[in-house]
Image (tube, rainbow, N blue to C red):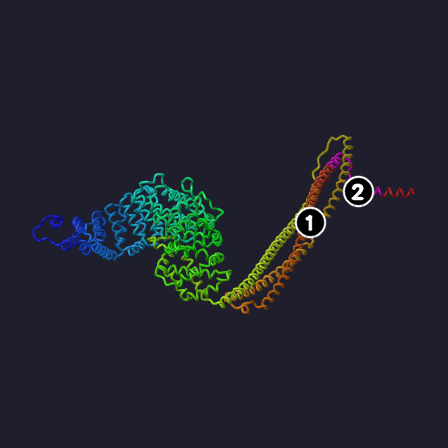
Amino acid sequence: MNFLRGVMGGQAAGPQPTGAETIQKLCDRVASSTLLEDRRDAVRALKALSKKYRMEVGTQAMDHLVTILQTDRSDSEILGYSLDTLYNIICNDEEEEQDESEDENTQKQTDDLGALFTEKFIQDPERITLLLTLLEEFDFHVRWPAVKLLTALLKSQGTQVQGIILVSPMGVSRLMDLLADSREVIRNDGLLLLQQLTKGNAAIQKIVAFENAFERLLDIITEEGSSDGGIVVEDCLLLLLNLLKNNSSNQNFFKEGSYIQRMKPWFEVGDDNSGWSAQKVTNLHLMLQLVRVMVSPVNSPGATASCQKCMFQCGLLQQLCTILMATGVPADILTETINTVSEVIRGSQINQDYFASVNAPSNPPRPAIVVLLMSMVNERQPFVLRCAVLYCFQCFLYKNQKGQGEIVATLLPSTIDANSISAGQLLCGGLFSADSLSNWCAAVALAHALQDNLTQKEQLLRVQLATSLGKPPVSLLQQCTNILSQGDKIVRRGSKVQTRVGLLMLLCTWISNCPIAVTHFLHNQDNVPFLTAQISENLGEDERLVQGLCALLLGICIYYNDNSLENYTKEKLKQLIEKRIGKENFVEKLGFITKHELYSRAALKPQPVFPSPEQMLFDHEFTKLVKDLEGVITKAVHKSSEEEKKEEEVKKTLEQHDNIVTQYKELIREQDAQIQELKEQVASLSSQNEQMQATVTQQLSQIQQHKDQYNILKLKLGKESQSQSSSSQGDSSQVNGLQTEELSQLREELDELRKQHAVLQTQLAERDALITTLQSSSQTTESPAGGSDNTELQQELEALRSQVQSQSLEISHLKTERQELLRRAEAESSNAASPSDGSLDASAVAELENRLAAQTSETEKMKRSVVELEQQLAAATSTAAILQTEKEKLQSEVQESKKEQDDLLMLLADQDQKIHSLKKRLKDLGQMVEDEDDLDTKDQTSDDDDDEDEDEDE
């Protein structure tokens, strides 16, 4: 302890030890002391010396400090000292004041030390894992130094540390837990740590995003006051930018999670926008960048369109337009807002239409486009603001033919309103102003109104300009060429490279792919001599770009020339180039465009970003046009008249071949459609046949069931009649004490019952005859005629199916041959052969036509067979319906007969019972009662006696 007192400030006698010796002794004490207090004091002393003696502590004490982190996990104080010491030797932040002359060297040495100690520390990946484990400690004196140390390691050797954390189990999850810490210091430093962790590593960015980072960060931004918040909001926005920029997966997750809607409240501004703090400006600037990341032109078109649609639906675009038209907004925020609105509406028709409807809060109200163009052509406005307005106008017209038509319409004589300023008037004013930057911006903006729109290129030819009093108006095309070629004052103004480049880009865009505009341009006799003179001259370095653009313009006049002007046909223009310029010299001058250093910079991205106005020469869309036309113009210039004639012949041959192929394709499509219809008809007939077969089978089964039921009823009726006859001989009741007059009554009743019995027997016989008739008709219904008809119908259907199958095979073979023939035609077309070689084989075509005719006849036969089969099926269906009706009638008659027969049997049974009871009573009374058989015999005998008596009388 006395030693430590000497180190920490006590005055000891004798020579003082050097810093390296002191650090060595402290390291020995840390390694050898058994008491925790001694080790803690030694580590505290190392922490105190670590800033002054950074090299010595880093080289001698690092391993001992790591050992302390591994072994003394129970003591948070010593852990905190160790982590602070490691942070001091790794961190490159230099807090001490130094002379300006020494700043650069000192900073370089500091960075070298930080990188050296970081590499030494991460040689063992387990040390990073150890720090991640220490983050689970809730103690502030452990967790906060661990966060700072990891941040310093990531700053120094980010890629290596990211790789270690990525493979560490739950490594990223432990770091994400820092955002939920209630202590703001740890949470805020955790944000800085995640910023360093997510830089340039897409895998870690995805893991952090799926650890619910978006939700937590947006909650923190809201809690801190959104754009009015402090540095914490800035850190959150920087982390969000790291997670979303150039990461399509996270961008899609952000959109699908409905987090775009939560961005809308950030851009709510009041009426009084004066006195914005620097932090608010920074926060809003980052928020606008975050919106631009989601709709950046470098993203996939589908993802960008989806985000643009979402921003319009949630009202975010409307909120941005409110900021755009608000007063008092700082210039840099206004510029960034214009750029943001530009990319939100770029290529989205709905958003572009909404932007066209936005009006500025002026009296009278003016369209936002007009107000922005006024800023663009105003030379007193900041350069970056003018570039932003140009970008906004370009994005408004990108893939927006409706907007292009509206802009061009403001220039036409029939739509000009003298009482208001239109977009077209502003563009013309900027095009011919004294400011070269306004000339260039207006020319590029007008070129975008014509981009890929042949209709507007032709419409713009109608625009007439009034040059001065007493002179007739001239066309806009002629005025642009006049600025390039005529007049002393005009030449001086057009001599500025920026103005001339802008006008040449406008003319090249205007007449490209528009033969009518080319004819109008060539109709001016001064244009071609001016271009050839410009190309053939040997000008300085600054004029080379103008020469290249003049060569491009002349090449467009050749390539898109329809030879309507006799003096300036393709061939004459090429002869003029060969005589006055030379083909090789022309191609060399044409190559000056793509070789220019600013060309490649403009080709990178659509937004016009230039460090100074003088470097504002190329437009992004124009670089695409040059790329498309340079090669074809070079070929067109080198081609001879014979080659052109051959090409025209080849084109005609190809067109003929294309027409033939098109005709065959149409014929094949028609026949395929017919075949498909026939297949569908066959399929429907097959299904109908199956349904009919099922119906017939069902009806046969029902008839069989009715037959079985009828037989069962017959058997039941026979059994009942037998049981009734046996029961009629049953019990006899005693009749005693009856009077003599009762006997006569009984006899009378007996006679009546006999008569009724006879009547009932007659009715029963009639019913039996009716049942016999019904049985015979039922058997007739069950005759196999219907089954044979159905069998024949099924056989015909099977035959038709086999014919259809064979027809399908023949058709497939025919289609294969047609495809072979089509491939031959297409191969001949692609090879661009001569007409004799490229024509289709006549014999093959004739054979194909014959087979097609045969196929057509076979198809007609099959249709007739199908019609006949349908008729037979209809007849079978009607026959089955008639049979069904007759069957139902028979069933109803059988049921009625059965009911009547049952009633008769009941009556007979009652009569028999009464007769037997009366006979028994008569026998009991002593009367002679004859049975029915005796009565029948007696009646027969009496009839014979009567006959004999009659014979005797005769």
Residue placed farthest to the right in the image? 954
Q: Is residue 525 left or right of residue 236?
A: right
* Crowd around label 2: few <14 · some 14–19 · many ≥20 (10 Å): few
- Estimate the x, y position of residue 379 in percent, counting from the top left: 36, 48
Q: Which mark is residue 936?
A: 2
Q: Is residue 669 left or right of residue 119?
A: right
Residue beneath the point at 82% across and 43% down: 940
- Estimate the x, y position of residue 713 in percent, counting from the top left: 67, 46
**What's the magenta region?**
917-943
Q: CA distance from mark 2 to mark 1?
A: 50 Å
Quadrant of residue 232 within the rendered picture: top left
Residue 798 highlighted magenta (yes or no): no
* SS majority, magenta: helix
Report which residue position mark 1 lands on.
882
Please state which amino acid type lies under the numbered disc 1.
Answer: Ile
Asked whether the viewer can see residue 193, the reply is yes
Looking at marks 2 and 1 on the same chain, the residue that comes earlier in the sequence is marked by 1
Q: Which mark is residue 213?
A: none
- Estimate the x, y position of residue 586 in percent, counting from the top left: 41, 64
Q: Dot 1 lies on which element?
A: helix
